[in-house]
Amino acid sequence: MIPFVPVYQGATVPAMNDQLDTALLVVRLAFGFGLAAHGYNKVFGGGGLTGTAGWFESVGMKWPALQARLAAATEITTGLLFAAGLLTPFAAAGMIGLMTVAFWVVHRNNGFLITK
């Protein structure tokens, strides 16, 4: 809860806090379930973990089978925790770690949408 929210014309502080809480809930759900869906897809979609490991190997990861499992488990776990609002600092740290690796390994040389 944010301790101070400025009062705008016609709005009361409790109404502003309710709106902020609702907005944060929507953001948490979108990011959390979105990330969990990516992890689920790494395990059960397309080529499964074998396909994910193959792609990880193609982008230069050293232990693709292990890293595919860790990435999928981290995405599912941190996504669900973040969506539920449980252990959010740890869930957010896991998300930041995942996205840092994704940026460094793939997007750094290929752009945001991997168009190169």
Image (tube, rainbow, N blue to C red):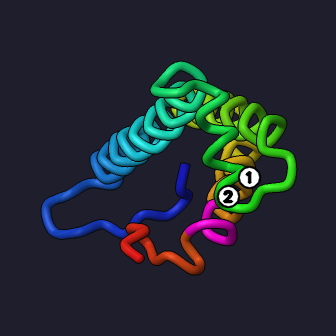
| Residue 46 x/y as whole percent | 46, 27
Q: Residue furthest left?
A: 10
**Horizontal placement of 41 versus 72: left or right?**
left
**Magenta-span inclusion, residue 103:** yes
Front residue of 86/48: it is: 48
Looking at the image, is 11 positioned above or below residue 68?
below
Looking at the image, is 88 positioned above or below residue 57?
above
Q: Are marks 1 and 2 in contact (CB under 8 Å)?
A: yes
Identified by mark 1, the residue type is: Ala
Q: Which mark is residue 96?
A: 2
Q: Residue at x 52, y 32 (%)?
A: 83
Q: Which residues are magenta?
A: 102-106
Which is the main secondary structure of the residues drawn in magenta? helix
Front residue of 94/1: it is: 94
Q: Residue at x 52, y 39 (%)?
A: 35
Q: How many numbered marks have been drawn onto this rendered protein structure?
A: 2
SS at badge 1:
helix
**Quadrant of image for the C terminus:** bottom left
Number of residues whose C-alpha sits closer than 10 Å to that of mark 1, classed few (under 14), some (14–19) or many (20 or more): few
Q: Residue furthest top?
A: 44
Q: Residue at x 75, y 31 (%)?
A: 69
Number of residues whose C-alpha sits closer than 10 Å to that of mark 2, classed few (under 14), some (14–19) or many (20 or more): few
Disc 1 designates what residue? 93
Front residue of 78/110: it is: 110
Q: Residue at x 73, y 47 (%)?
A: 94
| Residue 112 x/y as whole percent | 43, 72
**Magenta-span inclusion, residue 40:** no
